[in-house]
Image: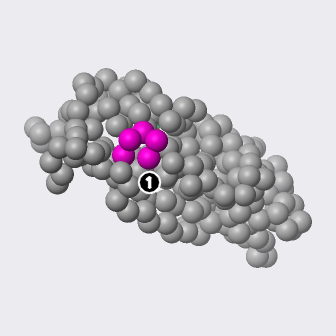
Amino acid sequence: MNNVSFREGNAVELPFADDTFDAVVTRLSVHHFDRPGRVMSEIFRVVRPGGSFVVADVISSEVAAESELQNAIEILRDPSHVRMLPGSDLTSLVKQAGFTIESETSWDKPREFGEWMGIVNDPSRVPPLRAVVRALAKAGASAGIGLSVHGEEIRFFHRWNLIAARKPGGQSG
Ligand SMILES: C[S@@+](CC[C@H](N)C(=O)[O-])C[C@H]1O[C@@H](n2cnc3c(N)ncnc32)[C@H](O)[C@@H]1O
């Protein structure tokens, strides 16, 4: 394969000139950024006028207390998690960067505590987190993600949002 190259860099300062790309795609990254607005501005800068931008990420509840609780649970599982944004905030960031939104699609992915904890490489962290999440679910705290107990299983969902957008000007396509 000789028509692909890889570059590593920080998303808040992309190592590319203005108007370089026909399209930029980013998936499951925004909830790891502590300056997501800055990253959106960088993406806008490197997409050419008329070029495309697609972002897909998991989003949180629009209810502030639910969003806060969901993000707290996620951070306990994965300390590199910063913040799942409510969908309206993700859309606003894309618009504020200068893009025109072309479509938005949302869906829910069912999750279960055991498989969700699969990325944790220190097994001693699983039982205490299970106890806390189970107690929250039993107390009726849905965290905006349908947190619920079914026998030994703790179920919830991740809500995804996929936004397709375009940088104004130039030739589209
Ligand atoms: C959950 S992984 C998603 C990986 C892949 N995009 C996917 O959809 O499977 C999050 C990725 O975001 C990257 N990331 C987080 N903060 C970043 C930053 N400031 N600059 C560049 N990449 C970053 C991490 O290195 C990691 O690869």
| Residue under the point 74% across and 52% down | 64
Residue type indicated by callout 1: Ala
The residue at the far left in this view is 2
Overall secondary structure of the magenta section: helix
Q: Position of residue 117 (x, y in %)?
A: 64, 53
Looking at the picture, does residue 146 appear above or below residue 88? below
Q: Position of residue 133 (x, y in %)?
A: 79, 57
Instruction: Classify mark 1: residues with Cα within 10 Å, few (<14), some (14-19) or many (20+).
Output: many
The image quadrant of residue 79 is top right
Q: Position of residue 10 (x, y in %)?
A: 42, 26
Q: Which residues are magenta?
A: 95-99
Q: Could you say which is closer to the camera, residue 15 or residue 42?
A: 42
| Residue under the point 84% across and 56% down | 131
Q: Is residue 33 left or right of residue 26?
A: right
Q: Position of residue 119 (x, y in %)?
A: 58, 48
Q: Does 125 appear in magenta?
A: no
| Residue under the point 17% across and 54% down | 173
Q: Is residue 65 visible?
A: yes
Residue where numbered disc 1 is placed: 56
Q: Is residue 33 left or right of residue 148?
A: left
